[in-house]
Amino acid sequence: MTAFQYQPQFSRRTLLRGLGTAVALPAFESLAPAMARADSAGVPTRMAVLYVPNGVFMDRWRPIGEGRDYAFGPTLEPLVPFRDRLQVISGLSHRNATAGPDGPGDHARAMATFLTGARARKTAGSDIRVGISVDQVAANAVGHQTRFPSLELTCDESRKSGNCDSGYSCAYQFNMSWRSPTQPATPEMNPRAVFERMFGTGTAGERAANLAARQARRRSILDFVAADARDLERRLGGADQRKLDEYLSGVREIERRVAGFDLPVADVPDLDLPDRPPREYRDHFELLADMLVLAFRTDSTRIATFILSHDGSNRSFQEIGVAESHHEISHHQDRPDRLELIARIDRFYAERLAYVLTRMAAVPEADGRSLLDHSMLLYASGISDGNRHNHDDLPVVLAGAAGGRLETGRHLKLPGERPMSDLFLTMLDLLGAPQDRFGDSSGPLAEVLA
């Protein structure tokens, strides 16, 4: 585990190993003293995409003003603490999500097109086809540098077959990431499965067996790496010892929260792992979000997607006084009562983004900046107004600075309409995965750069 020079990839992939476990660690200055002299180019850039469904109430969502002289609308007020660490972008569109000759099915097309920039073949059968998604293009280029090429998360059940939206396969409506034009990268909603993937070793069956052994002995995953942890601690300076203790305490807290939602094996005989998602949406989201931040912090992956809910979602939000289905009220017909409920949901989702940004901003990097400063976090929907089902002037927030290469602290209002794929082309370049074209791109979106 000795590091002879500053090697951020090596130190970030340092593992504490035990029986069936592998706990990745954050970077430690004690193991690589030259870290303190590293410039921002020595810290990796990460990309995360958070998707919100059914469009938004744009009048409440839009910022007031342009450029640096702007203020958040009521929906995005939870982002005020991060005003100078993000940019709101107006004028991006997905033309391949529009009806064209294919007729109804905007929710399925919104999801399928969102990260691919491609038009989905209208079919409810097995002959699905859309395009490889931007996250998987990036994973193919840089994923070999981390334990996992990419991480796909969702707060919904996942489906890959059946007819979900006016003749479109459920595969389109429940998946945002695509490894190939015909193969979705199925997102994981189960916190236990995500935890075991991050900290277990071996095949899925071996991870399940290791979990059963830990549970039978009432042991934490950290108990199995204790010897490695003690050996490492002896070699760390005082500040890094505290950092290690804080990090391992965080892992143990996530493990405790995951365990709080486990079910006995007998109750769920058809599942590979004995568990279920949290009962409350907020708890479910925060647990998955914390594991996403942990994966970035330890450089276990640099690419992640997170479906807060699939497009067309019928989720209700009792916790904020919305008993009706989100999808149903998104067809608001300009009724003030429904618009008010939509605005309430939109703000609730914006608060989830603020939660992730808060967690990322609290993680220091070797150059004195934060994990957020070295990331690109795209928060958006594939539909603008849920009543019109339009795919132009999409609601888009781009948080983080990609190591100082992205402009922040402004509302970027583009003249006319630009393909969302132009933004993806620029993001791929910032990740070290440059492409000549992507989806329906017309060229890089240089306007987002610093």
Image (cartoon, rainbow, N blue to C red):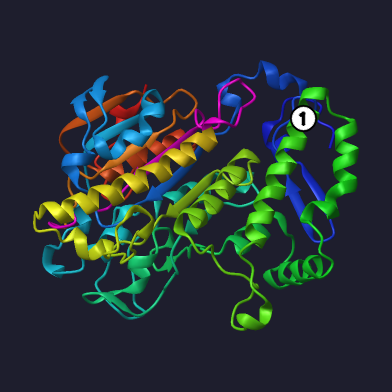
Query: Disc count in the image?
Result: 1
Where is 267 relative to 366, above or below? below
Frontmost residue, 71 versus 194: 71
Give percent across and percent down for residue 114: 31, 54
Frontmost residue, 337 versus 54: 337
The residue beneath circle 1 is 242
Question: Relative to 376, is 64 on the left or the right?
Answer: left
The question of residue 325 being in magenta is answered with: no
Residue at x 71% of width, y 55% of height: 199
The question of residue 363 being in magenta is answered with: yes
Q: Amino acid at mark 1?
A: Arg
Give percent across and percent down for residue 41: 56, 24
- Secondary-structure class at tag 1: helix
Find the residue positioned furthest to the top.
37
Give the magenta part as a residue range.
361-388
Question: Relative to 228, is 194 on the left or the right?
Answer: left
Residue at x 41% of width, y 74% of height: 160
Q: Within the image, what quadrant is residue 30 found in?
A: top right
Give percent across and percent down for residue 389: 16, 58
Give percent across and percent down for residue 309: 38, 59
Is disc 1 surrounded by few (<14), some (14 to 19) or many (20+) residues within 10 Å?
few
Question: Relative to 160, is 275 on the left or the right?
Answer: right
On-image quarter of the C terminus: top left
Where is 236 relative to 427, above or below? above
Question: Relative to 417, is 449 on the left or the right?
Answer: right
Where is 109 relative to 400, above or below? below
Viewer can see residue 434: no
Viewer can see residue 42: yes
Residue at x 59% of width, y 83% of height: 270
Residue at x 72% of width, y 67% of height: 207
On-image quarter of the N terminus: top right
Q: Within the image, what quadrant is residue 331 found in?
A: bottom left
